[in-house]
Amino acid sequence: MKKNGKPVWGLLGPYTVWAFVFIVVPLGFVAYYAFTDNSFSFTFDNIIRFFTATSQSGDTEVRTYLLIFWRSLKLAFISTVICLLAGYPMAYIMSRANSRKQKILMTLIMIPMWMNFLIRTYAWMTILQDTGILNGLFAKIGLGKVHIIGTESAVVIGMVYDYLPYMILPIYSVMAKMDLKLIEAARDLGCNNYGVFRRVIFPLSMPGVLSGINMVLIPSVSTFYISQKLGNGKFFLIGDAIEGQYVANNLHFAAAMAFILMVILIIMMALIKKFTNGMAYGGDSE
Amino acid sequence: MEKIIELKNISKSYDGVRVLNNINLDIYDNEFLTLLGPSGCGKTTTLRLIGGFEQPDEGDVIFMGERINDVPAHKRNVNTVFQKYALFPHLNVFENVAFALRERKVPKDEIEEKVHEMLSLVMLSNFAKRDVTSLSGGQQQRVAIARALIAQPKVLLLDEPLGALDLKLRKDMQQELKKIQKATGITFIFVTHDQEEALTMSDTVVVMSEGRIQQIGTPIDVYNEPVNAFVADFIGESNILDGVMLQDYKVKFADQVFKCVDAGFGINEPVDVVIRPEDVDIVKPEDGMLKGTVTSVTFMGVHYEIIVDVNGFKWMIQTTDFVDENEKIGLTIDPDAIQIMKKSEYSGLYGDYSTYSDEVEELTEIESGELDISEVEGAEEE
């Protein structure tokens, strides 16, 4: 960058350096490790292993990593849907509340994020355990015991709890900026509450929904630890698998899994973007 | 003519601030009616009551004989052109205009036909596929009008629709709106703070101030026969003087007795006297009813605007004759140029032209606490 050049480019400098050293270079390493063996010669073995490795599950033989990956996708998808269904109305209500209430609600949503992720997960363990707080409460009010810990539901609960704010905040920020005159205009042109929502509020909130989905789906697909603690280690997710391989010093295979996960996520996000754009701007035309 | 909307004894407050105070107004079919007043006068609130976006605290809104206080906006046969257009940014021009018909589940080919008819009415036929955010202000304005008219409302409400346009475009749109109103036969209720706009376009002007209607009349009526000092000051330029009605057809002001054409006041009743700047003739000092000294001369193109000091009161006079600063001149006023008004709460608020600029005047008024429109305005904008 030359002296007295455009200041904008100068300001980008630190980030560019940061991004190069901590994002581009490590990604290059991930790719490099993914396609090499322990003696650093080129190989597809790690990739092939991901798709073909098998193991015994009860009586049947399953493809170990494909099954884990499928489970990660499934739980992440369920968590994202739940976050969307719970977060969207929350974001809407928040955006319509007066500014004092907005601040209170915002703080309530942010407070859990101030606590460490591990502590939050441990807290859910004590709540969901068979002899935990939830079952204690159920017993008090005369309900039967429920067994949640160690099930997929427990993992989903943990993920929803952790990622819900990331769904609410982007939707809220889009809705809070929405011009209220547009809602009046829709009413003026004959829309009842449902029509206003369907034809104006929802389509205009799509950019927020999209980034909400991005921000919940991606970390939940690659999450680990939640599944180990709340799933009692029975539900290995792809994040756990990568961590396991890494801890076992199997760097090349860990890198291969990370690489595959990344490629699949990029494809998924592209598809979601295409699909939601169609909904936002093509819904009424033709 | 048939009454289409009646507002009866309407009052409305926001947070304890009264923005409408006992409004009574009849609006007739096929009329171009303008609600005119400074910001905070309650004109927008009145419009929103008719549109169904606000409910009156007291009084009734009657639409074609039926009370519609509780009818929500989407069920009223009234459409609105919003101040900043409020076009839907996610829809193109065609879909914005088609919006109301889609809601009514009108068949596709009929929608197609109607939208194109509307777009050609506002001269945007080739813009159907365009993104609304790519349009200029004037074009967005036209889309907003087409969108509101397509549902064939009985009444179209326009909330300062020309405020964001530049002067030349605004003049064009004024003509065009008037044309559209005549062509469609729809009643237009137009809100503006621009008195010139109101006079040019309207069949009826409703002058409002502080939540009350001050005067209802044709543009010529409100200009020539303002009912009080507020209306006289707000519409056009005016010299407003304290006077005393000596008897019918005889009024005293500026220490002189003048003949006038007004009658029906009490003997020696104090009154406000309005004389428009263009109605004062300049003559030689010895021939004048009043004598004064020219303190400033401004060239306005068609005429000069001069300020004349007559015994300390500064008159504004518009004339095509050239006079020099510091020249002594005489003034004469015809009897029919003298408009007599009853004293009102606004008497004495509007002085002479010693502070000439409206802006300076407003600033000094706000500083001295005479004007407290900020709160009311905030409530209205909400």
Image (spheres, coloured by chain):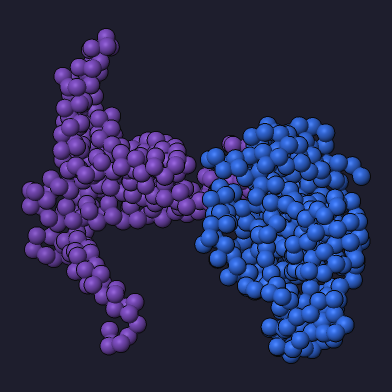
Chain colours: A purple, B blue
Q: Quadrant of residue A240?
A: top left
B369 or B98: nearer the viewer: B369
For the point 59% across and 65% down, which residue is it? Answer: B362
Q: Residue lying farthest top?
A: A142
Instruction: Please state if A7 lies on the left or on the right of B323 as rendered.
Output: left
Q: Quadrant of residue A43?
A: bottom left
Residue B192 shows in this picture: no
Is B279 placed above or below B160 here?
below
Instruction: Please state if B339 lies on the left or on the right of B57 as rendered.
Output: right
A235 or B225: nearer the viewer: B225
Residue B307 in picture, x, y percent from top left: 71, 79
Residue A281 in picture, x, y percent from top left: 56, 53
A172 or B349: nearer the viewer: B349
Residue A47 in picture, x, y percent from top left: 23, 54
Quadrant for the N terminus of chain A, please.
Answer: bottom left
For the point 19% across and 42% down, which residue is it? Answer: A115
Instruction: Please state if A198 lies on the left or on the right of B213 as rendered.
Output: left
A235 or B378: nearer the viewer: B378
Q: Quadrant of residue B182?
A: bottom right
For the point 22% across and 52% down, which residue is it? Answer: A257
Is A16 placed above or below B44 here?
below
Residue B272 shows in this picture: yes
Residue B160 in picture, x, y percent from top left: 68, 58
